[in-house]
Image (cartoon, rainbow, N blue to C red):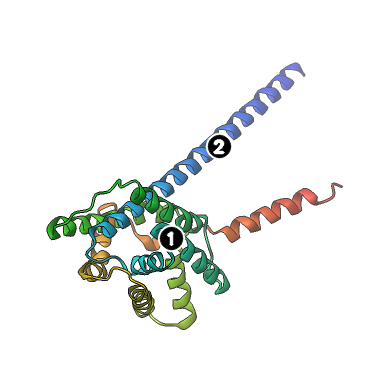
Amino acid sequence: MIAIGGFYFLGENKIRLVNLQLEREKILKLSYKVLRLVLGLFVFAAGSVCIINAAIGVAPWDVFHQGVSNVTGITIGRANIYSGVVIIIIDILLGQAVGWGTLANMILIGSFIDFLMLNNLIPSFQSFLPSLIQLFIGIILHGLGVFLYIAVGWGAGPRDGLLVVLTKRTGGSVRLIKTIMEVTVVAIGYLLGGNLGIGTIILALLSGPIWQYIFKIFKFNINEVQHRFIQEDIKILKEKLAKTEEPTP
């Protein structure tokens, strides 16, 4: 009997050690994903600041953010955040699933942009050639940032979510909906004083191919990413709460 009790005790300890090891692995995996997400959003923000500081034309949404900043007096980063809030609300109302990465994208990219710009951590140049090089560096950083944070699988950015849900709702092609969206925000941003120039055209034509080449280098297929959304976590939490509230027999 003692021997049996001893074996039971050892078996119980082994189970506890295995469970503890599994918990540690979960924490490490979660920590890695959080760090990768934050790093990716920081790299993307650095790319945005490079493009903004190049001052030869910015990305369509940043034309809009600059215009809003120009009219309201808020920073470009805050314009990015506030527009992200509005877009996420529209996404949810239209039925688009939102991930924790979507919320992080909304808050952190704008915050990082302000941090980098207000502290002058990324230089700007007066002559065209260095500015053009800086623009291309910004495009590359954008691609690296997207690779880092999208691969985490916690949802895309608010604007990408809007593109997806509008494509589903209207039945139009991604190219058509993306073009309409970007032409609209560029027009509004330009009228509000945003920086529209040759850089905007370069971004429109070359961002896709450059990003695709970066993804190819890292053997990353964006269509294979399985995203986890907030709605799923809420459902799991509700199920757990329901189980704890069940009466014991």
- Residue annotated with mark 2: 22
Between 225 and 71, the one lying in front of the other is: 71
Q: Quadrant of residue 70?
A: bottom left
Between 116 and 150, the one lying in front of the other is: 116
Task: Tally the numbered discs.
Answer: 2
Residue appearing at x 49%, y 80% in the figure = 169
Measured Cα–Cα span from mark 2 to mark 1: 46 Å
Residue 85 in view of the camera? yes
Residue appearing at x 48%, y 63% in the figure = 82
Residue 156 in view of the camera? no
Secondary structure under badge 2?
helix
Between 63 and 240, the one lying in front of the other is: 63
Left or right of residue 220, residue 126 in this image? left
Secondary structure under badge 1?
loop
Q: Position of residue 160 (x, y in %)?
A: 42, 67
**The N terminus appears in which quarter of the rendering?**
top right
Between 163 and 200, the one lying in front of the other is: 200
Crowding at dot 2, Cα within 10 Å, few <14 / some 14-19 / many 20+, comes out as: few
- Residue annotated with mark 1: 74
Q: Amino acid at mark 1?
A: Ile
Position above or below: 79 against 95:
above
